[in-house]
Image (tube, rainbow, N blue to C red):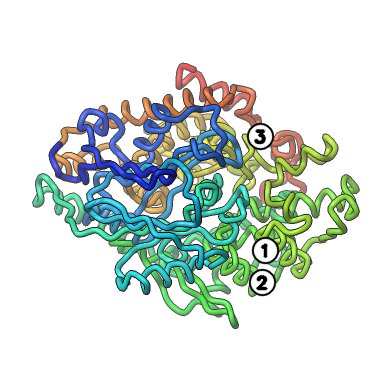
Amino acid sequence: MASYGYGGNILRIDLSDERFKIEKTSASWIKSVIGGRAANTKRLFEELDPSCDPLGPENIIIFGVGPLTGSLLPASAYYTVTAKSPMTGILGDSAAGGQFAAEMKLTGFDQIIITGRAETLTYLLVNNNGVKFVKCEELTGKTIVETTSSIRKVQRDHSIEVAAIGPAGENLVLFATIVSSGNRVNGRTGMGAVMGSKKLKALGVRGLGAVEVAEPIAFLSEVQKMRDAIAAHNEYDKRYRLGTTMLMNDLNSIGILPTNHFQEGVCDYVDDISGERLADEYKVKNKACFNCNLHCSRYYVAGEYEAEGPEFETLCSFSSRLGSDDLPFALEMNTWLNQMGLDSISTSEVIGWIIECQEKGFLSPEELDGLSISWGDVESIRNAVNLLTLREGIGDRLADGATKLSKDFSEEAQKLVMQVKGLDIICGDPRGIKAYGLTYAIASRGGDHLRAEPYFELTNRLEESKRRFGTEKAAMRMEEEGKAALVTYSEKIALLTDSMTMCKNIGLCMDVLNFDNASALLKSGTGVDYSAEKLQKLMGDSVNLQRKLNEKFGVSREDDTLPDRFVCEPLPRGPTKGSTVNIDKMVEEYYRMHDW
């Protein structure tokens, strides 16, 4: 196939036999999915035995980039890792930004497909000619930064980009992460555990190629339009200063900031844990992913702890969600999670679930080897996180996540796990953001917002809402009318950003990417005439394929729902007081729009 945009090759690696094979990327195959996440899902659908053990050698793990990854397109810095999830048993994937994706693109591989299991702990070094297998038992138990530094030092090349697992991945914590660029996290669905099960400590990439576009002048023109739209956005300054932590005050102001494990949506001490306080007292500089003109990531120093971030999910997960007003503790946890390789949402959920269950008398400390935790008890929380990272004592059970752990207890306790399809829900209470509630319910990887990220419902752009979705109510967070139309649109744009690839915070939340300018970018970038209509159809087809894949894994209509708390329990106070979610009505409308 033509090299414009795409790398043009696929790398297949068998860890069991230490063999690799390079294949040409099929033009017809890749054009039907664009690349990135959609391509990974199609590969999994075609090649994975759905009955396989997610932690067995037969599971497939795929690193994928898109046709515009590593180009001059702003925020084109993302890659997606896909496998059968050990946490949920269904489609698992997670995306991350930073620098890794751009370097992978320069190797010329659109996908790196890894199967089998190494005999001993191993890392892989990929360049344009293939892969080198390196035994690395000396890296056992090493953190992400230690692993990255060691690989670069031993290989005498500090330009190698490394995606690694920490001790949590080696110990097969089911929500273990992969971390690249030191602090950029593939967080959800346990992709780090899949790497750990294959005894794969890290994947290093070092490319010597280039990204060529079909029509450079036209492409540069479209790129400049995108840069201008980002810089002119009314949230640019706020996002630059605070990044996603701006949501701490934003969500609290509308009564949907998870507090004490979603029992409330208003946090009285939000100023103590806010993004504003973080920026004023701990941030030392801004950071950016490859070729991004927003620079929304931040680097902090808090005593002996320092790291990139935290993003909103981690900050909320280890503050209000667990009833803690201790900002330095949340920053400490961010550093720990990033270096041990743990998903912040799922780590927080298993702890928050225990606290609430103990508070309500549904489980006792004796049933958890003496583990007792209360709201804001940072010492006990720290201890629990350490135990589950290492799978020591009660940590061995905690490391399987709240959904699996709850099966050992009463039905009342099981209902208190805030999850959909086994994946723990993010830090946004759906009782006050109804389109997000629908997204959590139907998301193909479980209780997740990034499958659609319907941020539009928070904008109150009423006239535009009526034009785009047929009703002003789609832009009103408390309304349920029009939310199926909004989510159906947003999930296609979300998938398109993951397939091109591009950051959703910019492409989708800032609403600067649409099917028309994506068509122009892809045509000038790849030379393929992707019309806006064609892109909508391809993304719709991929959404349907995700559904078919999950049906192979046993997912049914009954799984597209929300925990009882959001459906039956009104929020007790604040701007969203009294609200619940009529999830069945919205899901039915969503199904009709998809002809499911």
Apparent side of residue 509 relative to residue 199 in the rendered image (left or right): left
- 122 or 81: nearer the viewer: 122
Residue 448 higher or lower than 186, as above or below: above
Q: Place residue 140 in its image quadrant.
A: bottom right
- 465 or 292: nearer the viewer: 292
Element class at badge 3: loop
CA–CA distance between discs 2 and 1? 8 Å
How many marks are shown on the rendered structure?
3
Residue for point 66% across, 62% down: 318
User: Would you say residue 77 is visible in this rendering?
Assistant: yes
User: Would you say residue 185 is visible in this rendering?
Assistant: no
Upstream in sequence: badge 3 or badge 2? 2
Q: Place residue 97 in its image quadrant.
A: bottom left
Residue 579 placed where, x, y %? 69, 40
Identify residue type, mark 1: Ser
Tag 2–tag 1 contact (CB < 8 Å): yes
Identify residue type, mark 2: Phe
Residue 13 placed where, x, y %? 36, 44
Residue for point 45% across, 38% down: 60
Q: Mark 2 points at which residue?
A: 329
Apparent side of residue 146 relative to residue 424 in the rendered image (left or right): left
Q: Mark 3 points at which residue?
A: 562
Upstream in sequence: badge 3 or badge 1? 1
Element class at badge 1: loop
Identify residue type, mark 3: Leu
Residue 210 placed where, x, y %? 17, 55
Residue for point 10% across, 51% down: 216
CA–CA distance between discs 3 and 2? 30 Å
As drawn, the label of residue 197 is: none
Residue for point 47% across, 73% down: 299
Q: Mark 1 points at which residue?
A: 319
